Image (spheres, grey):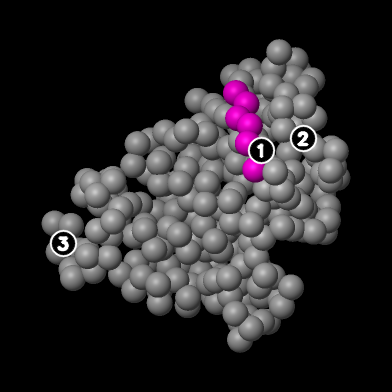
Amino acid sequence: MLSMYYGPDLLRFDRQLLLIGREAQLKLRDARVAIVGVGGLGSNVAMQLAAMGVGHLVLMDFDEVELTNIHRQPLYDESDVKKPKAIAAAQKLVKINSKIEVIPVVGRFEQNAYRIENVNVIVDGLDSISARLLLNAFAVKFNIPYVFASVEGYYGNVSTILPRKTACLRCFMPTGRGDEKACAHGVYPPAVFMASAIEASETVSVIINGISPLAGKLLVFDASSYAFDVTDLKRNPSCPVCGDQGGPARGNKKHVPVAGSAHCKGPSFRPNRDCAEPAHQ
Ligand SMILES: [Zn+2]
């Protein structure tokens, strides 16, 4: 069955089939993944998932490729400048793997959310906290696993949210911290590649196993020193998004600052101190 679908291209997966097996490859083939934002994080995740054989990808982005993107977004080249990112990304991905379905959506998530109601996993490729919180609320509402990541400077975070099973983004990230784009402070390309590689691995794990190593946990890393730290996250029962009773959040005073937030940037950030406190103590 697998060989019928992939045909002679099955050979391309030989090295990963040795690790994950054919049944898992079949799950990747049948999976639908939405990547919301195909900038630094999203374009690199998309490239990895397409290459690994994830069968259906929805790419959503309202923005165009800029020359300043290319240093950390190698899916694009100089000829793509001024093209819509979703279109340019889709054109490249089908060259990497012509057997998959890639659906570009040029527009903002707020106006196009209905396009991804039926996906198996949502991947975060966004660059602002307010947009991420919207995406998180959508993922919880439609019970879709959500792989979150953010990068600023040399620092990155990754977590996987399984709605109503693990802490959602709102459980550990408050609103009202300002919404400046993380890239405004500079971005170290290897930090983006590290975060996107971990996002891709989380996505594959959720598709194959229904769970992933970072479900309910927050990975914080510093790409300048290779320091990694993983913190357990607990659901806030009063979370206004995923809480059992709804209502205003309470009893969760120690939110976890993440890269891209006003409380976690620059050289003062260190895993396990400023930015890796447990959400509940
Ligand atoms: Zn929550």
Please give the range of residues in magenta. Answer: 226-232
Q: Residue at x 34, y 74 (%)?
A: 98
Q: Residue at x 84, y 43 (%)?
A: 267
Q: Which residue is mark 1?
A: 227
Name the N-terminal-most of marks 2 and 3: 3
Q: Is residue 202 above or below residue 275?
A: below
Disc 3 element: helix
Mark 1 vs mark 3, foreground winner is 1
Which amino acid lies under the numbered mark 2 shown in the image of this protein?
A: Arg
Mark 2 vs mark 3, foreground winner is 2
Name the N-terminal-most of marks 1 and 3: 3
Q: Is residue 43 above or below residue 96?
A: above
State the image coordinates of residue 83 (x, y, percent, origin top left): 63, 80
Q: Residue at x 83, y 52 (%)?
A: 180
Q: Quadrant of the C terminus?
A: top right
Disc 1 element: strand
Q: How many angstroms separate mark 1 from mark 2 (CA)?
A: 9 Å
Mark 2–mark 3 contact, CB under 8 Å? no
- In screen coordinates, is 123 left or right of 277? left
Q: Is residue 82 above or below residue 29?
A: below
Is residue 185 visible in the rendered image? The answer is: yes
State the image coordinates of residue 46 (x, y, percent, origin top left): 49, 61
**Is the residue marked by circle 3 packed among few (<14), some (14-19), or many (20+) residues within 10 Å?**
few
Q: Quadrant of residue 105?
A: bottom right
Q: Residue at x 79, y 20 (%)?
A: 253
User: In the current view of this chain or complex, which residue is farthest to the bottom?
Assistant: 79
Q: Quadrant of residue 174?
A: top right
Q: How many angstroms separate mark 2 from mark 3 (CA)?
A: 48 Å
Mark carried by residue 270: 2
Q: In the image, is the residue at mark 2 within 8 Å of ligand 1 by its beta carbon?
A: no
Disc 2 element: loop
Q: Which residue is mark 3?
A: 3
